[in-house]
Amino acid sequence: MWKEALIGLLFPRRCPVCGEIVVPKGKLICPQCRKKLSDVSGATCMKCGKELAEPDSEYCLVCRKHPRSFEYGAALFHYNEVSARSMVQIKYKNKREYLDFYSREMVDRLGPKIRRMHADALLPVPVHPARRRARGYNQAEELALRISAQMGIPVYKNLLIREKKTAPQKELTPGERLRNLEQAFAVKTDLIPEGLESVILVDDIYTTGSTIEACTRALHRAGIPKVYFIALCIGGDR
């Protein structure tokens, strides 16, 4: 106990939204900052989990236009200016401690849905080895390990790999993004344990769904029939 107190004194926890020392002490996020994060709520797409612009629809606009290979997915927060700043800090500024809050929130809010997926394993969406070396870690893997510790679902962090370093995705359409990613992912088939039939992909951000779709297709080719996903943030229905 005294060791934890000393660590807390020397390295006080920072808020994943404002970046300041969390007040009150012992929390993972400032209560006022928690209110700034926009929860995904209400009617959501039956495939990707985006909050629907048209509540009477079953699927979002993108999922209606582009058939999905994965079963379905879910996300915590809308991907907006507030959450985007926090994700940048996690991905590029080594603020991995912020994932303590996000993983706890994910388990608390999405835990029942995750359990209904009956997954055999969590698979972090991989980054290219060059990016991992530069960054020092994969944020999706860090998130998956924290969820695993709380839910008891094993993480297979080396089963799905990224072989191709793709061009920037921002200016591409969903179809172009998928083609850009189609050959980027591969599965180490020798690492697939006997009986693995259902997995959950774990990522920080879901926008068009191209990355999750490309990963799903690679897993299907390797003989894994059921693929779900969970993400911290998700784009809007457009």
Image: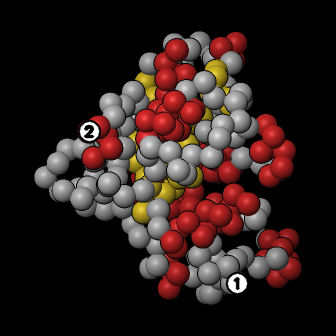
Q: Earlier in the sequence, mark 2 or mark 1?
A: 1
Q: CA distance from mark 2 to mark 1?
A: 43 Å
Number of numbered discs visible in the structure rendering:
2
Q: In the rendered view of the protein, which quadrant contains the N terminus?
A: bottom right
Looking at the image, which is closer to me, 145 or 163?
A: 163
Q: Residue at x 40, y 42 (%)?
A: 73
Residue 207 in picture, x, y percent from top left? 46, 50
Asked whether residue 172 appears in the rendered view, the answer is yes
Asked whether residue 230 appears in the rendered view, the answer is no
Judging from the image, what secondary structure is the residue with disc 2 in?
helix
Q: Specify whether 155 is left or right of 79.
A: right
In this view, the mark in front (2 or 1):
2
Residue 160 in picture, x, y percent from top left? 64, 28
Q: Residue at x 84, y 49 (%)?
A: 134
Res 21 label? 1
Residue sticking out furthest to the left? 56
Residue 82 in picture, x, y percent from top left? 52, 73
Q: Specify whether 194 is left or right of 158.
A: left
Judging from the image, what secondary structure is the residue with disc 1 in?
loop
Q: Is residue 23 above or below residue 209?
A: below
Please give the residue where the numbered disc 2 appears in the rendered image: 64
Q: Is residue 45 above or below residue 76?
A: above
Q: Residue at x 63, y 29 (%)?
A: 184
Q: Is residue 138 above or below residue 188?
A: below
What is the three-letter code of the residue carrying label 2? Arg
Quarter of the figure with residue 187:
top right
What is the three-letter code of the residue carrying label 1? Ile
Looking at the image, which is closer to me, 162 or 116?
A: 162
Residue 182 in picture, x, y percent from top left? 55, 27
Other-residue count near label 1 (Cα within 10 Å), few / some / many at <14 / 14–19 / ≥20: some
Q: Residue at x 63, y 51 (%)?
A: 143
